[in-house]
Image (cartoon, rainbow, N blue to C red):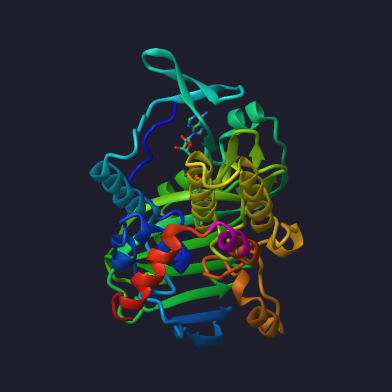
Amino acid sequence: MFQHPDVVGSKAICQQRDVLDVWATVGAEQIADEGLTWTTGRTFYRDHELFSWQFVDRGHSPLPPFVNISQARTGQVLDRCIAGKGLIDVRWGHDVTGIAEDRSGVTLICATAAGSVAVRASYVVACAGAHGQVVRNLLGVRFDGHSFDDLFLICDIRAELPGWAGERRFYFEPEWNPGRQVLIHPCPDSTYRIDWQVPAGFDLDAEQASGALDARIRRVVGDRPYEIVWKTVYRFHTRHVDRMRVGRALLAGDCAHLMAPFGARGLNSGVQDAENAAWKLAFVLRGWAPEALLDSYHDERFAAADHPRPDPAVSRPATARPGAADRSRGARARFPGTPGRTTGCRPVQADRARRYPRPDHRRRRQRRRGGRAC
Ligand SMILES: Cc1cc2nc3c(=O)[nH]c(=O)nc-3n(C[C@H](O)[C@H](O)[C@H](O)COP(=O)(O)OP(=O)(O)OC[C@H]3O[C@@H](n4cnc5c(N)ncnc54)[C@H](O)[C@@H]3O)c2cc1C
């Protein structure tokens, strides 16, 4: 059943400026304000530091280039925003089991605790997530790609780690996670997100029961006190649907594409889908553009999902080999959790935006000119 998501857990932590800009447009600037921006990236091979780099924002936006903040907190801020505006009718507990389209709209059949309910709309945005196979089947789309055997053990821990709040640390084959990688990201509220690449079959419960989880965390935090805020095991996939528009339905987010965590594209690309869909639907519904505008949703967002093409050899969780430092430097934008503009859609989108100028683009430019100081 479509339930309200849990409000714990970092999940997608890195949010890039374009996305912060979208949040600001809908009144959720708080996400950028609360998020943490790290400025140093440090990369290690075994116990040697290969290189570190300072992240300098040369942009002129009032928004930071990216922030780290938990997806759970992002959801809370957005829920509050939705409740405050009264523009959105939120219906939790509605499980879509049928979709029927006709000349004037779409009818969704939903299973609810009170029985089956029909919901009518002019268009739908299908954002049922990775597990939305029912919805993908109803729309008749394929979801081809790859799933990876290795897993990521993720722990959000709260601890005082002096000097770590401004650094992202990436360890290749540390002696304390042999043959695999570990990634540590600072988050707000003295919380650190640690990702360990672990083999298929990894058993988190057994690890915790045996004390191995504590030992694992102690290899990072030493003997300082720490608290586990959230933990999970995550398998990643690279897949996407073959069509992002099916009649009156636009597919968005994980329902349409699953990305390897390299480049922090999961949440970021989902929000960009939603923004692209939202303004186009508004234009069509208000009669400012023909319905054919919606075809550009597929063109642009499919290109973004498909680029870089999800090649398993590229997306495979990398472990460095001696001499890999230079390659690693070049591939920095592909590292998990490293914010980067990896979508290929902007030029097309900019072109469409010129043909159908959007009021909110103008507002954003004005806000930037007279906006907050960097
Ligand atoms: C452990 C973990 C760690 C992650 N780490 C990162 C990261 O570091 N960086 C990153 O970018 N991304 C990360 N991700 C991915 C990121 O969380 C997703 O990209 C993001 O949540 C996708 O949002 P979404 O709204 O498309 O889908 P979801 O967040 O999955 O939401 C889909 C919703 O649709 C509902 N639904 C499903 N089927 C139906 C139906 N038939 N009818 C009605 N509702 C339905 C579901 O209940 C759910 O509420 C991580 C994910 C996980 C699980």
Q: Position of residue 189 (x, y in %)?
A: 27, 65
Establish if 317 lies above or below 205. Answer: below
Q: Name which residue lies at 52% across and 61% down.
A: 196
Q: Is residue 79 left or right of residue 351?
A: left
Establish if 26 lies above or below 159. Answer: above
Quarter-of-image position of residue 369? bottom left
Q: Position of residue 331 (x, y in %)?
A: 66, 76
Magenta-drawn stretch contains 133:
no
Residue 177, visible in the rendered structure: no
Q: Quadrant of the N terminus?
A: top left
In this view, the residue farthest toward the left is: 84
Q: Position of residue 249 (x, y in %)?
A: 59, 35
The foreground one among 190 and 140 is 140
Q: Which range of residues does the magenta coloring cover?
A: 351-356
Q: How many marks?
A: 0
Q: Is residue 254 left or right of residue 88?
A: right
The foreground one among 234 and 284 is 284
Q: Is residue 302 left or right of residue 156?
A: right
Q: Position of residue 35 (x, y in %)?
A: 33, 66
The foreground one among 208 and 166 is 166
In this view, the residue farthest toward the front is: 287
Q: Quadrant of the C terminus?
A: bottom left
Residue 137, visible in the rendered structure: yes
Establish if 59 lies above or below 304. Answer: below
Magenta-drawn stretch contains 353:
yes
Q: Name which residue lies at 59% across and 30% down.
A: 135
The foreground one among 13 and 120 is 120
Q: Name which residue lies at 59% across and 59% down.
A: 355
Dominant secondary structure (helix, strand or loop) of the stretch shown in magenta? helix
Q: Is residue 238 left or right of residue 105?
A: right
